[in-house]
Image (cartoon, helix red, strand yellow):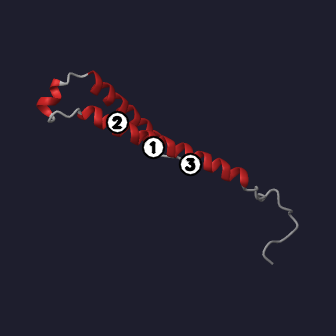
Amino acid sequence: MQLDIRLPMGLLFLLLGVILVVYGFISDPAIYVTHSLGQNVNLHWGLVFAAFGTAMLWLTRRARKRAATAAAATPDSPTKSQRSPGKPRGI
């Protein structure tokens, strides 16, 4: 099994994005008027983070499916123990 950094990255960004989106929806709109030129930055960046996290999770899932398909399509090569012991190789 290979380590795929996209899985923890995707989970982290998705979780942070969902937290920011929820906070953007439930927070008082008056704070955005005074601090961020009227833009709900928590909502906007939460959506960006959630979209990036979702993309990372999708790429992870796609890579796992491709690896499983490639492994199923490739015939297994014989290991050293399965080769006939009497034949010298490369002579």
Q: CA distance from mark 2 to mark 1?
A: 12 Å
Crowd band around label 3 with a 10 angstrom C-alpha radius: few (<14), some (14–19), many (20+): few
Q: CA distance from mark 1 to mark 3?
A: 12 Å
For discs 1 and 3, the disc positioned in front in the rendered view: 1
Observer-nearest of 88 and 74: 74
Which residue position holds label 3? 63
Question: Label 2's element?
Answer: helix
Give the number of the disc on residue 47: 2
Q: Quadrant of residue 84?
A: bottom right
Instruction: Please tell me whether residue 3 is drawn above or below residue 15 in the rendered image.
Output: below
Q: Earlier in the sequence, mark 2 or mark 3?
A: 2
Question: Label 3's element?
Answer: helix
Question: Label 1's element?
Answer: helix
Q: Is residue 33 left or right of residue 87?
A: left
Instruction: Please tell me whether residue 3 is drawn above or below residue 14 in the rendered image.
Output: below
Which residue position holds label 1? 55
Q: Are marks 2 and 3 in contact (CB under 8 Å)?
A: no
Residue at image position (56%, 46%) is: 62
The percent position of residue 60, horizontal first and vertical second, equals 52, 44
Q: Earlier in the sequence, mark 2 or mark 1?
A: 2
Residue at image position (20%, 21%) is: 28
Instruction: Please tell me whether residue 26 is drawn above or below residue 5 in the rendered image.
Output: above
